[in-house]
Amino acid sequence: MALLRTVTAAALWGSVVSKALVTSVSRTIILDEIPFYLPAEPVLQLPSLINIDTGILPFTVLPPLGRGESIQALRDNWTAVDDVFNDGFLQAVLFQGPLSMLSQSTVSFLHEQDVTILTNNATSSLSVPTLHLPGLDSLAPGPYVLAPDATGKSAVYTPLRLHFDPSQSFFKSAARKSDGSFNVVSASLDTDSSPYIGVPSRIRDLNAKGPLAGVRVSVKDIYYLKGIAASAGNRAFYTTYGIRNVTGPAISRLVDLGAHIVGTTKTVQFANGDRATADWVDYHASFCPRADGNREPSGSSTGAGTSISTLDWLDISIGTDTGGSIRGPASSNGVYGIRPSVGAISLDDVVPLSPIMDTGGYMTRSPKLFSKFGKEWYAETFKTFPSFPKILLMSTDFDGVSRPAMTVYNDFVGKLQQFLGGNASGVSVTRDFSIPSLWNQTSGVGIPVQTFVNETYPTLIAFYQWTNVGKPLFDDYAALNGGRNPHINPQVKFRWEFGESQGLDGYNAELAKRETFENWTMSHFSRVRRVFICTREPTITHALLLGAQWDTRSINAGTYSSRETYFSGSPSIPFGFSSGRASSLARVPEVVVPIGQIPFNSTISGIEEQLPVSISLVASRNCDFMLLDLVDKLADAGIVRDVKTGRTAF
Ligand SMILES: *[C@@H]1O[C@H](CO)[C@@H](O)[C@H](O)[C@H]1NC(C)=O
Ligand SMILES: *[C@@H]1O[C@H](CO)[C@@H](O)[C@H](O)[C@H]1NC(C)=O
Ligand SMILES: *[C@@H]1O[C@H](CO)[C@@H](O)[C@H](O)[C@H]1NC(C)=O
Ligand SMILES: *[C@@H]1O[C@H](CO)[C@@H](O)[C@H](O)[C@H]1NC(C)=O
Ligand SMILES: *[C@@H]1O[C@H](CO)[C@@H](O)[C@H](O)[C@H]1NC(C)=O
Ligand SMILES: *[C@@H]1O[C@H](CO)[C@@H](O)[C@H](O)[C@H]1NC(C)=O
Ligand SMILES: *[C@@H]1O[C@H](CO)[C@@H](O)[C@H](O)[C@H]1NC(C)=O
Ligand SMILES: *[C@@H]1O[C@H](CO)[C@@H](O)[C@H](O)[C@H]1NC(C)=O
């Protein structure tokens, strides 16, 4: 029989002058060696204390079992689909159907396993132990725990399974309360530096209606959740602003669609530009599990990337992407990632970097879920798309790619071309497509694009964030700390100083340059190359830009960048232009798709490891659903597939 080994309790004390009052109790329990968390808030309060020997009783509510259905088969199914339910919860059961309908094999099971039957009334014709518990009939099928509440009466709790976070991806574990706000899940268990993460049973979602019912989601620690504090990767920000009083619309929408928010993940400070070892001074960067486990995790959605590549019980990681903050981690971790068109989802109540380029995106391991999730989350912005592209433009990024990686790319591009209709139907592949060269020929600006937009991205992010986040933080922190300045990571501080030095005039000049670039992509490409416009005319074809890198480190193409590297010299301003920068400036969607892996010899592990190879697909503005559908159909065709957690993606 199941063993309830340890019970620990944490209490919040109310402030009553004469005597302290326990207002809330949350507990960590260990059932058959597996840790669970009982939130402070019960799902059901009973009128009195039920006297049971153990004080705490795990139990299961079972749905009506149809003819031929047995408790054993249901147990096997639930054990397979859910990481919360286990045999420990079968020491007591409540049947939603009449006991008289139970099959002989179920009755035998109850006898053999010494199961206690819970009933709403005192009578049971079965000769098994019975506990009378009025009021339990409102509970949906799944695992529960009966335990005393803060007032000393019995109550029913929905246990959260506690999972270790080996890649240190999370800042905190969170669970939603009945009033819609969030609570921190704070387990009392031995852990190195990351919290244990509590997840709800998947059983209660098996028959739920929401399109994202039961999807478990981690959230980058720059999205505000009502009831818990956000750090944005900065300790001063965390203590200055404290508990948030509102959940932003992007996350509220996910909750409405049925998703479960399980916690907040680590972010590069202010979603700006820290590298793991050089710049994460305030907090420590999470770990990328791929290959030797020592690769730069990339950022800024760092914990988002490492959580989804490490934890098989997690389905989706929410991040943001301004200049590569999802594309970089998606590449580094070998998972699916999207930077959608700007405006795909509201970023109200999210720490901004540059609203004109900021996007709310996500990462996942499954191409099918990748498609389904985005089509639900962005459903109020996008409806449909005209057709799959007929023109594939391979950027000059591929010139510098290693031979093994190029083999992976050529194989994929060949299959993609076949999938889109093949050579005979006019689907073409243009190699060595160069944005700088086309800009020279067609923009009429008379200045190379690398020079024209050289300072655009750094000025837009640095001036905006300094003015709207940095300056207010300095003021608010000083007011609370005797005029002191907060500590800011060196990279962010350097960039903010650059932003401030550009001034409003400098900012406005760069805003105009960005618009010139976007206008060029919108108008010129649509006429000449039909690249960037997602037209609503179903007959017009458009092209897809394929990329092998999102920045100069070309993480996509399986090159290795170690988190051990100490970057020399002072922090840097992200000047320049690259094909990854193009989607930021033009505000178009880009997805990163893992397509293979290549070997490399690690000086750390001392053996040959595998690094993921990914490809970037850039489409026209608002063609997000085309990209998502393309990935979905490529999965159906077996051209892309699920990636695994851990050392290797495939
Ligand atoms: C569990 O049951 C559901 C429907 O009752 C079924 O769709 C699913 O495939 C089963 N899963 C396993 C692992 O048996
Ligand atoms: C007792 O409750 C069970 C369901 O838990 C029901 O099947 C049975 O009819 C009830 N008996 C009486 C006497 O109310
Ligand atoms: C949340 O707090 C802010 C800052 O204190 C305040 O301006 C705002 O009105 C509050 N919003 C809600 C919904 O309470
Ligand atoms: C079509 O296929 C032929 C032969 O395989 C190849 O030489 C040619 O480059 C292809 N054309 C395009 C547009 O891909
Ligand atoms: C663009 O034109 C400049 C001269 O204005 C030239 O130096 C540069 O090489 C050209 N770039 C490309 C990619 O053709
Ligand atoms: C971009 O600006 C930086 C700083 O002013 C400068 O060092 C660099 O040469 C510039 N690059 C181009 C291509 O203009
Ligand atoms: C970009 O295009 C819009 C719409 O045609 C126009 O209003 C705007 O002035 C253009 N901006 C620049 C910088 O050319
Ligand atoms: C790794 O080292 C072994 C032994 O020297 C060598 O045979 C192999 O080709 C190397 N692999 C790579 C990817 O360099």
Image: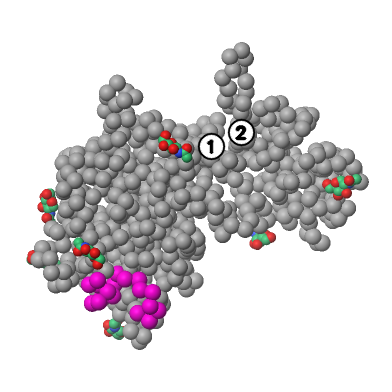
Quarter of the image containing the C terminus?
A: bottom left
> Pointer 2: what residue?
40
| Farthest residue, direction right | 125
Residue 382 visible at all: yes
- Tell me which amino acid carries mark 1: Asn
In magenta stretch: residue 289: no
Residue drawn at the location 73% of the way across and 29% of the way down: 153
The CB of the residue at mark 2 lies under 8 Å from ligand 3: no
Question: Ligand 5 is found in which quarter of the picture?
Answer: bottom left
Q: In the picture provided, is 249 more to the left or to the right than 139?
A: left
Task: Report whether 81 appears left or right of 294.
Answer: right
Residues marked 1 and 2 touching at CB (< 8 Å): yes
Q: CA distance from mark 1 to mark 2?
A: 9 Å
The image shows residue 532 at horizontal and vertical percentages of 30, 69
Helix, strand or loop for the magenta stretch, by majority: loop
Residue 207, percent from left and from top: 66, 57
Callout 1 crowding tier (Cα within 10 Å): few <14, some 14–19, many ≥20:
some
- For the image, the number of numbered tags is 2
Q: Secondary structure at mark 1?
A: strand
Residue 306, can we see it? Answer: no
- Res 257 quadrant in image: bottom right
State the extent of the magenta-drawn residues as a range: 523-540
Relative height, residue 187 to residue 299 (above, below): above
Q: Residue at x 29, y 30 (%)?
A: 475
Q: Earlier in the sequence, mark 1 or mark 2?
A: 2
How far across and how far down the image is residue 524, in percent? 22, 72
Q: Nearer the viewer, residue 193 or 56?
A: 56
Q: Residues within 10 Å of mark 2 (few under 14, many from 20)?
A: many
Q: Amino acid at mark 2?
A: Ala
Residue 183 image label: 1
